[in-house]
Image (spheres, rainbow, N blue to C red):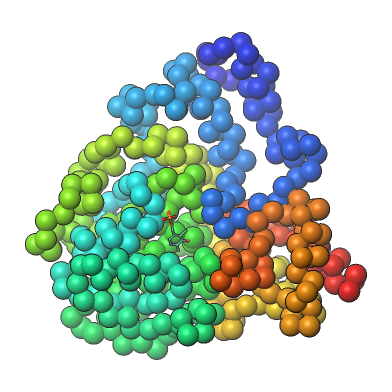
Amino acid sequence: MPSKMRDCNFNRFLNEILTFNREDFFFGMKKHNFFAGPSILSDFAIKNTADAVLDFAGTGLSILEISHRSKEFEAIMTKATQLFKELLDVPAEYEVVFVGGGASMQFCMVPYNLMVKKAAYIDSGAWASKAIKEAKFFGEVDVVASSKADNYSYIPKNFVVADDVDYLHYTSNNTIFGTQTKTDLDVNARLVCDMSSDIFSRPIDISKYDVIYGGAQKNLGPAGLAFAIVRKDALGKTERPIPTMLDYRTHVKEGSMYNTPPCLQVYTILQTLEWYKAQGGVAGMQKLNEAKAALLYDEIDRNRLFKSSVTVEEDRSLMNICFIMNDEYKELEGAFQSLASSKGILGIKGHRSVGGFRASTYNALPISSVQVLVDAMKEFEKTV
Ligand SMILES: *Cc1c(COP(=O)(O)O)cnc(C)c1O
């Protein structure tokens, strides 16, 4: 129970929050949140954040109005950074920073800081292609592989990386197209990876990477922040001047507090990380994610109405499961969407560039929600 109450009018609301159960809260109908981002967070993270909005750490102030230089908030930033490192086993030569601008800002920060002359990029989806566009502002970009001609329905492989590139950039999970590279690449170059939509979903061999980055709003917290895991030795190689806020060294040196960080987002990120730890860390998440994905892909493969939109089975994402209706049932998409909505299943409409459906099964999504979706698919099949 928070130690101070700002206003007695909050009493009733606060009580509801402290006994918060999303099932009761939304008129008895449980919502199953399959949105691609912003996306589901654990009840633990939501509840603790709501609590801190009313009274942060017993200060009598809201996390929304507290000074980022207060010792209470500085402790949150330190803990979030430490736990981030602990859960991913980040080696000592790396630093973890939180910066504004989302993953899209990282598309330019990476080449700004790391590209001396030339970098290799894999074009595996819409986000990869945006990263390539930004990199071209800074030097020579070798697009070593692309699946664009096939609407990114698989992960392009069998590419050759020149010896003289500064790094190879790839997107581990293609959020829009539902494809994923599930292991750390094994190539003759330092790696840079956009892990926006699958960070903390599996253990990573960080030592292969110079930078791993991503937006917070898929597996970590609310939108508004990006994380970057940066190998400190990789910085300072380029001679181009880098504006202060876009220089990783600024954020490394200042512990992500060079300017005012979004305190609420950092607070929620810490709650998510604590929840991960309690769930067995990234190994626990990986197991859960594999079970959820197996349940849904098995049904997609079994059900005569649906099929996967990913053409190479091993490339199927464990985070964003894309499926479409078989050609002869195409006109039933709307009807299935309605049935799903009636069961509290939200956010399964596919991205406009793929069509069909996309069920995002991020870390915080319980397997029971996947079961509800699978049951709806079975029920729908019987009506056709
Ligand atoms: C969502 C997403 C982005 C964009 O993130 P922003 O924070 O909105 O800039 C980039 N890359 C991937 C893989 C994503 O899933």
Front-most of 224 and 296? 224
Q: From the viewer's perspective, is residue 35 above or below residue 55?
A: below
Q: From the viewer's perspective, is residue 247 above or below residue 4?
A: below
Q: From the viewer's perspective, is residue 72 above or below residue 307?
A: above
Residue 175 is left or right of residue 166, and the answer is: right
Quarter of the rendering occupied by the C terminus: bottom right
Front-most of 358 and 256? 358
Image coords of residue 318 (percent x, y): 58, 67
Front-most of 54 and 273? 54
Q: Quadrant of ligand 1?
A: bottom left
Image coords of residue 61 (percent x, y): 45, 19
Residue 10 is left or right of residue 107, and the answer is: right
Q: From the viewer's perspective, is residue 119 above or below residue 279?
A: below
Quarter of the rendering occupied by the N terminus: top right
Where, by quadrant of the figure, is residue 64 drawn? top left
Q: Is residue 321 visible?
A: no
> Which residue is situated farthest in the top direction here?
8
Tally of marks = 0
Residue 318 is left or right of residue 214, and the answer is: right
Residue at image position (47%, 23%) is 62
Image coords of residue 75 (percent x, y): 36, 31
Residue at image position (78%, 83%) is 328
Residue at image position (81%, 65%) is 335
Residue at image position (54%, 54%) is 37
> Which residue is situated farthest in the left direction here?
239
> Which residue is situated farthest in the right direction here?
383
Q: Is residue 141 visible?
A: yes
